[in-house]
Amino acid sequence: MKDVVPPPPPIVHNPLETVLELFRQYVVPSYGRFDLAFVRGAGRHLWDVAGRRYLDLGSGIAVCSLGHAHPEITQALVEQSQRLVHISNLYYHEPQGRLAAGLVRHLAAGKVFFSNSGGEANEGLFKLARRFGHEEGRYEILTAKHSFHGRTLAGISATGQEKVKRGFEPMVAGFRHVAFNDLEAMREALSPATAAILIEGIQGEGGITPATADYLLGLRALCDERRLLLLMDGVQCGYFRSGRFQSFQRILEGVRGGETFMPDGVSMAKSLGGGFPIGAFWVREPYADLLGPGMHATTFGGTPLACAVALKVLEIVERDGLAENARQLGAFLRDGLEALAREHPQVIRAVRGLGLMLGFELADGIPALAGGEKPASIQCVHRLHAAGVLTVPSGGHVIRLLPPLNLTRGEAEEGLALIAGVVRALAG
Ligand SMILES: *Cc1c(COP(=O)(O)O)cnc(C)c1O
């Protein structure tokens, strides 16, 4: 028989190079990756193949909400995997029901559907909106410019950024993008075919831009007036990162009319499983039964294992007051970044975000980055790696901090000091 699989690459004594070579040969190159390979994590630190330690202020893009190798998560994983991993949604199991109840408790009367990712959670919201408008021939979903809603075909159609669509046209029909935080533009964009509006409470990939309180309240009133679903993508900004369960709850704190605000649907994923893949969407009454038996499904959605882990994450976040921790350490980090921006306005132009979802925007034309081929944000993230701290670029100019929700004060100080060192070097 002819051997179609090429032999493995020869053993090289550079452990990073060995991993990179496997990827060059065998992994679809659809990601722009940094040349770092990790082998281990503990708490808010990761170790690379060469044994070097990094402070993780990115959490694998807002996913590792309790940091790495949290002993209680490990225990939940082990215990549930010894009992029951998967049964399919042909049957019932308690962890899925209990997790749904736990999520509903943080929102309002409604129900939850479980998926495996954020893109899939949003797909569920798209189908909900289509189903909602179907009898009246309404199908259109308006989203915001600079939004991000995932990489599925409908996800890139919903996303308000050209770069994710290019090369994959034609897009799924029925999505249009409107300027963010501009209520009048949204009102003008409505058509008789519009069924729903979908926004992020804080735009993540778009550069860390929170919705304003007036915009949220205005969209709610507009959706009520025109009988549209108001849908929120909480995949990145949700799950206690802002200091409240959902970012809209934080944005509307203390705002008149804010206590009664509720969207009709919310998608979640990223932090929900603390690193174990799970996504979900919540849908409010009276729409909770719109997707009836046989209308929507995914084989892996809400397995006993995923739900047991997510339940444990939720229990720990609530028990340890991690929303409050996100609020306090977020304010501390933000103050520190703002002080740096005042000190070096030629390097940091602006600081944005809420809780532990922060971004700092690099100024244009930083001389130290002028010669580089890569965008300024990537070059800056490289320098932060060299300093021993992991962050996430957002577009060409923004550096995101999305640390684990159980970050400590000491680690926040360590992170600020490392960032300050890089910013001072960039200031020259
Ligand atoms: C990450 C993200 C998604 C997509 O989630 P995946 O799990 O990558 O499919 C959708 N919306 C927002 C706001 C995100 O940040």
Image (cartoon, helix red, strand yellow):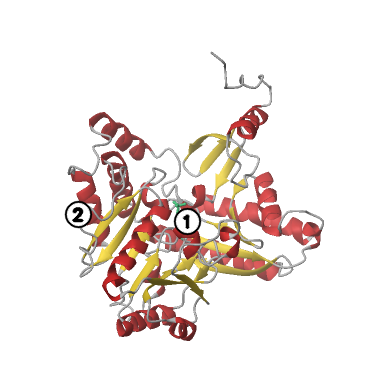
Q: Does residue 132 lie above or below 423 as drawn?
A: below
Q: Are marks 2 and 1 in contact (CB under 8 Å)?
A: no
Image location of residue 326, percent across then percent down: 43, 59
Asked whether mark 1 and ligand 1 are closer than 8 Å, the reply comes as no
User: How many numbered marks have been drawn onto this rendered protein structure?
Assistant: 2
Residue closest to the eye, 398 or 303: 303
Name the element at disc 1: helix
At horizontal 61% and vertical 64% (from top left) the residue drawn is 360
Image location of residue 255, percent across then percent down: 37, 81
In the orientation shown, which residue stands out farthest toward the top? 1
Image location of residue 38, percent across then percent down: 56, 36
Is 350 situated left or right of 258 in this image? right
Image quarter of the C terminus: bottom right
Q: Dot 2 surroundings within 10 Å: few (below 14), some, or many (20 or more)?
A: few
- Identify the amino acid type marked 2: Pro
Asked where in the image residue 340 lies, by quadrant, the reply is bottom right
Q: Which mark is residue 293?
A: 2
Q: Which mark is residue 153?
A: 1
Residue closest to the eye, 19 or 124: 124
Q: Does residue 383 lie above or below 5 as drawn?
A: below
Asked whether mark 2 and ligand 1 are closer than 8 Å, the reply comes as no
